[in-house]
Image: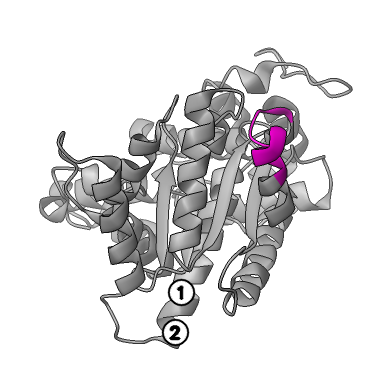
Amino acid sequence: MPLADRPDDDFGRYLTALPGWREFVAAATSEAMVMLMQTEYDALSKEEKYDYDEDRLDHHARLQVVATSTVRHTVTCGRRLVILNRGAVSARRGLIVTGPANTGKTIALTQFGLAHELQDRRRHPGQDERIPVIYITVPPAATPRMIAAEFARFLGLPVLRSSNITDLTEAVVGVCTKARTGLILVDEIHNISLHTRTGAEASDTLKYFSERIPATFAYAGIDIEEGGLLSGIRGDQIAARFTSVATHPFPYNAEWKALVAQMEANLLLHQHKRGTLSRLDRFLHTRTNGMIGSLSHQLRGAAVDAILTGTEKITKTGLLAVDLDIASSRKRPGGPSAPNDDQ
């Protein structure tokens, strides 16, 4: 995208707003950026090189998602539930994606949403008024009104101080019903604990939405089984209606190697030699503890550095220069710790 065409305000790009979700879908279905030949790059003017490099930085900032086994399993389970729920008038089944932090829960959830949106568009071509998917995140210490407000903000409905939960709920249900919303994604669900009165009421609000909106609900959160979402009578109701998909750190195996190779294939760096990262796949596994989120940050960060510094390639030294999250440096029980800089 030429620099002049870039939006000044990135707010609409957040997945928790409808314009942002639609941009996410558009980006996922658009043609991949093609890297210029070195001679073509050298022939660009200074301004053209700047715009081209900015486009490459954008490309690496949101590097293409690789369809891991976890993503494929989530999409398969989710599609099955959506189909089974078509004829249900109550007690629809839902999906919970759960696991440790940084293991790809949000990726799996949003890829399920993307698959559903694309399928809905194929079934109903040209019906732009439809809103097949809603994506919200649960705020910390969420109240029922805060949950309803998240729905309203995604849909672009006004959230005023004077708007009570009944007003917001009725507005949301009305729009979702008219727009034929079929899938509702709720991320950060671990922020709801049934051990507190507020958390129990927030959970009841989601349940009320699920009863009023003929859609499949899919949640994602950290270690749901160990949290407070499935405790007590309310928790038993959730557990009875939801299927669970677990995410986890990847072991060092053929899938991990393929994952690194696919991410390397998506790089747009002029001096990078294909196969460099594949030869470092064990090092990458040790350094990231097999966390897909840490691996993505590692490779995207190194690619950005390679463009900004002009080296145009990723090396082991360049990988070590990218600071990772604290969790990836912690040693897992029975697993390797992250290497020191001299490794």
Tell me the magenta residue range: 226-236
Question: Residue 310: which quarter of the image?
Answer: top left
Q: Please identify the quadrant where the N terminus is shown.
A: bottom left
**Is disc 2 surrounded by few (<14), some (14 to 19) or many (20+) residues within 10 Å?**
few
Residue picked out by circle 2: 122
Callout 2: SS: helix
Kind of residue at disc 1: Leu
Q: Residue furthest left?
A: 4
Q: Position of residue 278 (x, y in %)?
A: 70, 46
Looking at the picture, does residue 296 appear above or below residue 127? Answer: above
Viewer-nearest residue: 106 or 150: 150
Q: Please identify the quadrant where the C terminus is shown.
A: top right
Answer left or right for 293 relative to 186: right
Viewer-nearest residue: 44 or 239: 239
Residue picked out by circle 1: 118
Query: Is 41 part of what is drawn in magenta?
Result: no
Image label count: 2
Viewer-nearest residue: 111 or 235: 235
Q: Is residue 32 visible?
A: no
Q: Is residue 230 visible?
A: yes
Viewer-nearest residue: 234 or 50: 234
